[in-house]
Structures are given as C-alpha cells and as structure tokens.
Image: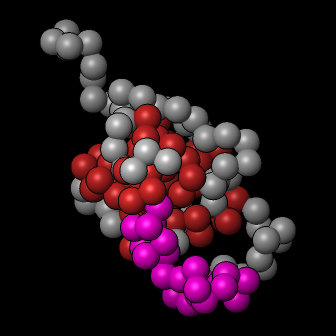
Amino acid sequence: MFEHGLSGRLWPIHGKPYADETLSSWLARLSRAHGANPIRFCTQALPHRKVWQWDVDKGTDDALLLELAAKTSTPRKRVLGTTIRGYPGYLTEDLMVTKRPPWLPTYLYPLPALVAILSRVFASGC
C-alpha cells in the first residue's frame, strides 16, 4: 500500500512528552531526534506555523497543539499538559496572550532570540 511503509500521518520519530516537559523542550527534543535544530525542524515539519515567533509554552495556538497530537499520536490532553494552559489556577489565573507574562524576566523575552541561541548550541553538538 505505501511504497516505503510510511503513511505520512505520523512523523518517523514521534516520541511522547515527558511527564514534566514543556512544549518548547519537547519540540527541541523531537527536532534533535530528527537530526535538525528546532527552528529548521519546525520550518520543515510545520511549514504553515510560525512556531518560534511567540512563547509556545503558553499554548495559545490550538491548531498547533492539535497538529502535534496528530503527528506524534499523543493524546490532546497530554499535549496541552506541556503548556501553561495545562495548569489553570496553578501557574497563572489569567493567561495574557499579547503581553509578556509578568513572571518572565525581560531579558528572556522575546523567545525567538533565546531559541536562536539555543539552536546554535545544539548545532555545535553541546
């Protein structure tokens, strides 16, 4: 039926998130498992999503969460659990989508700059 035995429904390596893992960490781990840095992997595997242009750990992009659940055969609830939205009432009462969270230091924002640095670290093999 499928020439190479792959349907394309799942990514070749579709590891599940660890119990206490954040979405950004899970994406970075999936990226490395596929032999790419996080930015390159997400650009190729999720070309219609701008994954690293906002704080993905907030979990505000429902379509991204659904696609990750489908591509990794992971229950939607478990994918949501990798985000801040998976902890209502524990980490934040009201998730602000458009502003920097007050608990996130300014020097860690915007996230794309941090991701670019981490991508270079991963690329160097550290």
Residue 80, position in %: x, y?
A: 62, 54
Does residue 60 appear left or right of residue 86 in this picture? left
Q: Which quarter of the figure has residue 70?
A: top left
Q: Is residue 65 above or below residue 107?
A: above
Q: Choose between 6 and 33: the one closer to the eye.
A: 33
Q: Looking at the image, which residue sits at the far left?
A: 3
Residue 125, position in %: x, y?
A: 43, 45
Q: Which quarter of the figure has residue 51?
A: bottom left
Q: Which quarter of the figure has residue 22?
A: bottom right
Q: How is the image coloured?
A: secondary structure
> Which residue is painted at 43% across and 76% down in the image?
113
- The answer to whether residue 126 is visible is yes
Q: Looking at the image, which residue sits at the far right?
A: 90
Residue 106, position in %: x, y?
A: 60, 89
Q: Is residue 38 above or below residue 90?
A: above
Say whether residue 93 is magenta: no
Q: Quadrant of the N terminus?
A: top left
> Which residue is painted at 39% across and 67% down in the image?
116
- The answer to whether residue 80 is visible is no
> Which residue is painted at 37% across and 35% down in the image?
34
Residue 112, position in %: x, y?
A: 42, 73
Total numbered badges shown on the rendered structure? 0
What residue span does the magenta drawing correspond to?
Answer: 96-118
Does residue 119 appear left or right of residue 98 in this picture? left
Say whether residue 102 is magenta: yes
